[in-house]
Amino acid sequence: MRKKIVAGNWKMNKNLSEGLSLIESIKAGLANGQGAGVEVIVAPSYVTLTEAVKAAAGSAVKISAQNCHQEENGAYTGEISTGMIQAIGVEYVIIGHSERRQYFNESSASIAKKINASLAKGLKPIYCNGEVKEEREAGKHFEVVQRQMNDELFHLSAEEVKKVVIAYEPVWAIGTGLTASPDQAQEIHAFIRKLLSDKYSAAVAEEISILYGGSCKPDNAVEIFGKKDVDGGLIGGAALKAEDFLALVTSF
């Protein structure tokens, strides 16, 4: 059965003390019974990860890294390997985020290798895909998502792909004030699940959580999360305030 998931990507926000304070506030809300049955994940910056794992220990909060390198070690100044992430107790890692693709020129080949490296270390990838505004306006969003999945994900076996969480990002709706309508979200999520079903099987497709990653907020989450093929969200701005994040966790 698919997990309901709300994952907060803090991006380049929150220093160590701010991040730990936010985790404590989220923990307090969850301890009061909010979000029962929902997998709650936060993705701090690298410098906060070690202490975040300690702060979340014994709670319902899971910790994710925001990125990783595809090689296990070597002369890659400034990079962090999956082995380093796994060794401190992190469970998830975000791979292929639209900002990594846009600002750091990540290729489909490197994204596929990062997924492989993550799975090899027992990490759970949160794999991101989605189209930019020009591609959506040209009606190429299905084509773009299908190409990304073919090039980056579909080399995996059925058992491997079941360990991946997919986050669909309408890039045109991130930080722009625009949001895909609930029906638009459902349409592309259903398309992604159909691709998984065609590649593997309907049973495999029904085990994979697909998250919506485009400006999801407390005032639109209930309707978006209520759609059949939307299993939660990969949250940006609304993940930086405990009140907003907890409101999303309780939006199912």
Image (cartoon, rainbow, N blue to C red):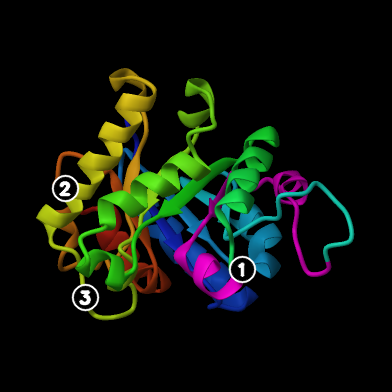
Residue 212, percent across and down? 30, 54
Residue 237, percent across and down? 37, 74
Q: Amino acid at mark 2?
A: Glu
Closer to the camera, 21 or 91? Answer: 91
First along the sequence among labels 2 and 1: 1
Residue 213, percent across and down? 33, 60
**Badge 2 density bin: few <14, some 14–19, many ≥20, Cα 10 Å:** some
**Badge 1 density bin: few <14, some 14–19, many ≥20, Cα 10 Å:** many
**Pointers 2 and 1 in contact (CB under 8 A)?**
no
C-alpha span from label 2 to label 1: 32 Å
Q: Which residues are magenta?
A: 77-104
Closer to the camera, 95 or 15? Answer: 95
Is residue 244 within the magenta segment? no
C-alpha span from label 3 to label 1: 26 Å
* Residue under pointer 3: 178
First along the sequence among labels 2 and 3: 3
Q: Amino acid at mark 3?
A: Leu
Residue 243 in sight here: no
Q: Is residue 208 above or below residue 12?
A: above
Residue 204 in sight here: yes
**Pointers 2 and 3 in contact (CB under 8 A)?**
no
Of the residues tagged 2 and 3, which is closer to the observer?
2
Res 181 quadrant in image: bottom left
Q: Which mark is residue 187?
A: 2
- In the image, taking residue 66 as reference, residue 29 lies left or right, namely left
Of the residues tagged 3 and 1, which is closer to the observer?
3
Q: Which mark is residue 45?
A: 1
